[in-house]
Image: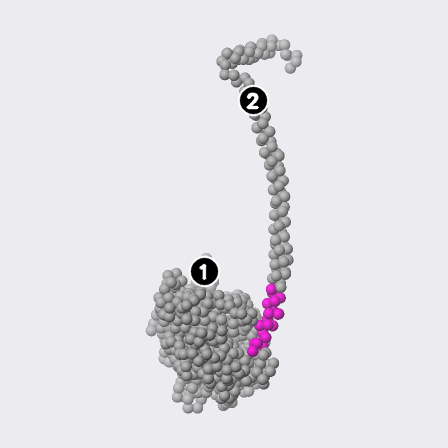
Amino acid sequence: MSEELLTTFTWLIPAGPLLVFFLIVLFTNRNKTLSWILAWAGVGFALVLGWLVAIAAILAFIEDPHHLAEHPQLVHSSFAWLPVGPFFNWLEIGVSVDALTAVTLVMVTTTISMIFMYSVGYHRWGDGPGTHPVKGKPNHDGVEPLFSRFFAFMSLFAGSMLILVVSDNLLTLFVGWELMGLCSYLLIGFWYAKKYDDPKQLPPRSAAVKAFMTTRIGDVVMLLGIVYFYRVFGTLTFSVALSAESLEHAAGLVGAGGLALMALLLFAGTVGKSAQWPLHVWLPDAMEGPTPVSAVIHAAAMVSAGVYLILRIFPLIVVAIEGAGGVEIVIGGIGAFTAIMAATIAVAQNDVKRVLAFSTISQLGYMVAAVAIGAYIAAAFHLITHGFFKALLFLGSGSIIHGMEHGAEEAHDHHTDPQDMMNMGGLRKKMPITFWTFLIGGLALSGFPIITAGFWSKDEILAVAWKEGATDGEALAFIIFWILVIGALLTAFYTARQISLTFLGKPRTKLAEHAHESNKFMTVPLVVLSIFALFVGLSGVPENFPILGPLFSNNFFEHFVATSIEETMIELFSLPVLEGIVFAIEEFSYVPLIMSLFVAIGGLFLGWWIYGRKALEAGQPDPLVRPLGPMYTFLQNKWWWDELYEKLFVNPTKWLARTFVYEWIDRGIIDGTLHLVARAFYRLGSYMKRFEEVVISGGVDWLKDQVLVLAQEFRAIQTGKIQEYVLVSVLIGWALAVVVLIINSGLLDGIF
């Protein structure tokens, strides 16, 4: 395939979903069938082009790995943005494809395509309008009233993520970044009319605002980082700014502290978008959107974009870490703390989707921590595998809820929560396809050994952390290793708990008794994603792994993705000002392998022992309530983060807005000034009115009256008789003659 054709394909990858968005909004929004067909066509177009570009990159690597390492960008096309006079090339934007882009395209286009297919069945296309369809509320017995709008927003979401992935610079990446923020707001609040009786449970509309405002905090700081990035490098193009030569020049220009500040400013965007502490609180409430939205946010786009960003700027982060040790502590500390904190919360959640939400937060913490210890390949690998199995799990949870809602319709029970796992049980036999695919996704999330993708990617992160900590003596890496091990144990435990409460035992409510399997639109994507959740990890089996390493791929993923930055890192090794930089890759060791096996199998067994061995009966409390005591309440209430933020930030902000901004500034200063000006002009107007009445109107009226009086006097001589006019004329003539004679006689000379 020619480079020109690949370039064209790359430019067109986001075009399909974006075009569909406009077509649905402008033309087909009244036709539900045509809308979803167009949406499928748009993502199918992106799927085909994305896979073609990725396969071309893989073939180029197989043909000549060294050439791809030396020239990592298989595709690079750019043009001047807003050219103005002498500043024609002041900023360039474009697209590029390297190995990291290729593997991300495979994951994003595949998962999004499956989510779009699933969405048609999820929103009950073809079921009729239902009994009481209300726009802005879930329609449990008929097609979604805003069906076309949903696919329009989802198409824009997909196109935004693809813009971000293929972008070769921070500007267009930020455009896709912000478009996804808009789409998340629109889709989290898709059921805008839905409300809850419980004041602690945010309705979709409030959850959308919370997500939008929380992520904006990170985005504003990130924008400052982008401005600083351009100020230092003079460009926003990754390949130019993040070359070894450019980084060396920047280090000499602003020093290690300047680069550290730049890296942390950009990392703030990841903290917001990928829901890392302290900006993690928006993601659990994002579950208020439809389940396909949750899958897109948690797997295919949105939160994945945050990790993708720090992978894309990895050379900058490494240089910043080497120059200023605090950067490693900040990034690694936030990632590791988030991983363990979110895992503990997931242990005590009963909502089937919120368990997965906190699981996502935790797994993203793994990736962030991996970047902090230099595990570029491991973080990228886990990003890809996590995208597949987390999309599978969310779509599986949607299938569970869908089945429970069917049960609610048949049982005429609309008061029992269909998302509460305590109301489920016994769904294994009623929903067999959902059960087996969800089980595969859960095992992958837990890192079940050998047969799941999650094992290989999570083990690689632990292997690098062990190498950096135990072998190379890095204290932070050693601490991160043990935190992630505990997090992995908790992950396996709450996954077994979720599977046991949902599928094992007997139905605990009539909803579960009447539940049944979802339609083919929903189950086929589950089967496809389960295949990826099982086998995509085989592309990254360590080459030194006994038997399986050489048998499968000799760690194809590592060698392929490493070409994205391999040449840059080699050059950085040789620079005196940047010497000592570490590019960590996995080295096989039995210690992290044994720990992975132990925590995965041990956590799953412990969860099954407590929840699955003797399944819960209807009305039975969670077995953890008694042994954990107040700690269970603490975990169930998510460490009280929302309440803490409410007191520390939300309430003071509301008080400031209400008291200072509204009362003092708005009503006191602004309104007071406006009212003062208004009163002054009113008083001036009254004086002007009096002047107009007295001087102008009065003077004109007086002059008018005098003219009328004079006219009245002159009217007396207007008799209409010619004789009188002749007489008066003669008298006037004689008077004038007398005056002329007197003047000519000189009698007045003495007087004048």
Against 655, residue 634 (above or below) is below
Task: Please identify the quadrant where the C terminus is shown.
Answer: top right
Assign a secondary structure to mark 2.
helix
Q: In terms of secondary structure, what is the magenta stretch mainly? A: helix
Q: Is residue 208 toward the left or the right of residue 111 in the image?
A: right
- Which residues make up the magenta segment? 636-654
Which residue is denoted by mark 1 in the rendering?
A: 82
What percent of the width, then of the height, locates residue 16? 38, 67
From the top left corner, tell me how far across and down residue 557 is, in percent.
Answer: 42, 81
Res. 503 image quadrant: bottom left
Kind of residue indicated by mark 1: Leu
Residue 443 in the image: x percent, y percent?
A: 45, 84
* Residue 101 highlighted magenta (yes or no): no
Mark 1 lies on a secondary structure that is loop
User: Label 2 belongs to which residue?
Assistant: 712
Give the x, y percent position of residue 657.
60, 62
